[in-house]
Image (tube, rainbow, N blue to C red):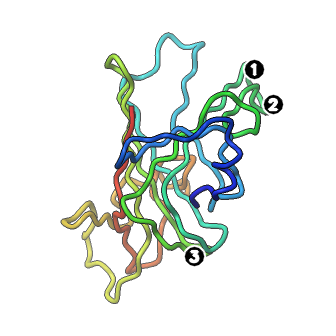
Amino acid sequence: EFPPTDYFAALPHPMLAAPGARALKLPALPRTGLLAQPLAFEDLRFEQAAPEPTQAAELHFVSERDGLMHGLAVHIEVYLASGDAPPEVSSAEEGSHWPNVLLLLAEPLHVSAGERLLVRTSCELGGAQPRYSLELFRAESRQAPPSSGEHGVSDGGRARDGDRADSGDGGGAETGHCTRLPAGTEWISVGTMGFP
């Protein structure tokens, strides 16, 4: 959800953005506005030689409550040690000097508790500045299930369940494979966002 007015009033300086801006850099974005738990879409490991120049991920979110979704919040976490330790730095935590990025949808989206949302991300790291693209889909039930072999991305920004190969491990956000949905369900594109 969009931060409340008291969030902006408490900022130490006025929040300025260009007219029509769809990517806002916001310090200490309140976590109370999140509709789902965060998921990682980019994992840069500096003990390896160099990250892959192109990365992609599929993130499956389930809304924890009813709300008005204004966009996707992106934050950074830095881990200095491996294992289960919490991050040493997180821009999602209060007091961090690193801002969060709020990628705004063209129009707010009403979501219900338990609603499934899919975000497909891509990162281009090879240029002078990284470029990120995120596309948001929502699950929608249809009257008739798809015919045999009807998979893949079709016209109108619709992606049917099974449009990515399933490794047989159950799928899900951590594996990068589509979560299996009931027959007759498809993903409907509701917005594309990006930022450098």
**Dot 2: element:** loop
**Dot 1: element:** loop
Circle 3 packing at 10 Å, graded few (<14), some (14-19), many (20+), is some
Q: Residue at x 48, y 42 (%)?
A: 24
Q: Toward the viewer: 62 or 18?
A: 18
Q: Give percent across and percent down for residue 8.
A: 63, 48
Q: Is residue 149 above or below residue 76?
A: below
Report the amino acid beneath label 3: Ser
Which residue is denoted by mark 3 in the rendering?
Answer: 112
Q: Earlier in the sequence, mark 2 or mark 3?
A: 2
Q: Is residue 24 above or below residue 171?
A: above
Q: Give percent across and percent down for residue 64.
A: 66, 67
Which of pointers 1 and 3 indicates the residue nearer the eye? 3
Q: Toward the viewer: 149 or 26?
A: 26
Q: Is residue 187 above or below residue 164?
A: below
Q: Give percent across and percent down for residue 115.
A: 55, 72
Circle 1 packing at 10 Å, graded few (<14), some (14-19), many (20+), is few
Q: Give percent across and percent down for residue 48.
A: 54, 14
Q: Residue at x 41, y 50 (%)?
A: 120
Relative placement, left or right, of 132 versus 14 is left
Which residue is denoted by mark 1 in the rendering?
Answer: 81
Q: Is residue 175 above or below residue 196?
A: below
Q: Earlier in the sequence, mark 1 or mark 3?
A: 1
Q: CA distance from mark 2 to mark 3?
A: 33 Å
